[in-house]
Amino acid sequence: MDQTKSHASTQQHPIKLYLIVWGWLFVLSTFSYLVDYFGFQGYLRWMLILLFMILKAGLIVAIFMHMAWERLALLYAILVPTLAVMVFIAIMAVEANYTLLTRLIFFGSSGT
Amino acid sequence: MTDATSASVGANANLSAWRRLATDWGSDQRAFKDVSWGKAMMWIFLLSDTFVFSCFLIAYMTARISTTEPWPNPSEVFALEIAGKKLPLILIAIMTFDLISSSGTMAMAVNFAYRRDRRKTAALMLLTAAFGATFVGMQAFEWSKLILEGVRPWGNPWGAAQFGSCFFMITGFHGTHVTIGVIFLLITARKVWRGDFDTERRGFFTSRRGQYEAVEIMGLYWHFVDLVWVFIFALFYLW
């Protein structure tokens, strides 16, 4: 039974596609390195870093890991739970800022 | 089982993607239809691994936000002097390109595996393993350099003490994943080279017939290791 099914789901794509994605990953990595090399700071730096990070992650998951061609049932089973991570990040960012505030108030700003 | 599965897959073929999602999950059978169990289980493992690495990176974020001491500047900490010129983060950039290249060769190995090209698949997998081993080597160099400069999990010469513990924990866990990946690549490459997937030789552990899909499942793990590095590179080294 596995024979017929694995044939149906075989991921067959032109080699050229992988080479193009490979090239883009190189370009995007170079861009993120240049962000540091030229020493951009503040919101511009964070936005550029996150933008290049998300683009690279998207290319790897969609093309290299073939998620773009998988059924939605699998895609959502894997990608939706990661939204919980986003909530966790938000909770801990608020918590960490609160910790910093209490440290500054009770221990003074000159060290912990 | 085959008839039932393929019949229901066929009946749903002309529904919209969203309707198919609903019927797939509501069909009271296998939710993932034509996705083999091996691939589905690898994806579920990768999801759990995503949570592990997320927890490390969130712990790092929490430590970095809440400390009152200045965070060491990674751009300077990881700078290397090459030919008398100080280049920021250069080793990390090389490691990034190395890992991306390994992902590229792995993707092509999967492609040749489905074309049943035994030699090219094995050669590309060995190349991927070589890139991976190079990565681990560079990481060992980076660790030794920082340890020599006095970075410890409980302190470092430049600022917040949590820098060391975050660094060793996150990159150490990632390096372990790369090392395990290299070992699995070598095992799978050997199977490909020997023709296990052409003769459907049974696996020593699962006793299931060998199939070229094993290369794609191996590839999923390897691309995930690269994926995690994308996040570590952005959030730990560049931030």
Image (cartoon, grey):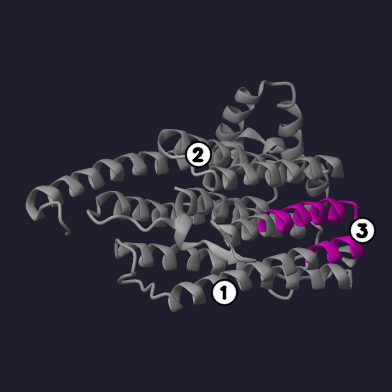
- Residue under label 3: B117
Residue B121 sits inside the magenta stretch: yes
Of B166 and B203, nearer the camera is B166
* Segment tinted magenta in the rendering: B99-125
Kind of element beneath mark 2: helix
What is the distance, in whole Å, between disc 2 and disc 3 at their CAs? Answer: 39 Å
Q: Chain of mark 1?
A: B
Of A12 and B154, nearer the camera is B154
Q: Are marks 2 and 3 on the same chain?
A: no
Percent of width and height locating residue A18: 79, 44
What is the distance, in whole Å, between disc 3 and disc 1 at their CAs? Answer: 37 Å
Which numbered dot is residue A50? 2
Asked whether, in this view, residue B149 is left or right of residue B209, the answer is: left
Q: Residues within 10 Å of mark 1 (few under 14, many from 20)?
A: few
Percent of width and height locating residue A62: 67, 39
Between tags 3 and 1, which lies in front? 1
Of B227 and B163, nearer the camera is B163
Percent of width and height locating residue A28: 64, 41
Kind of element beneath mark 3: loop
Type of the residue with mark 1: Phe
Inspect this view and state whether residue B205 appears: yes
- The residue at the point 42 percent across, 75 percent down is B149
What is the distance, in whole Å, between disc 2 and disc 1 at their CAs? Answer: 28 Å
Which numbered dot is residue B141? 1
Q: Chain of mark 2?
A: A
- The residue at the point 88 percent across, 73 percent down is B194
Of B24 and B238, nearer the camera is B238
Splitting the image into 4 quarters, where does residue B181 fall?
bottom right
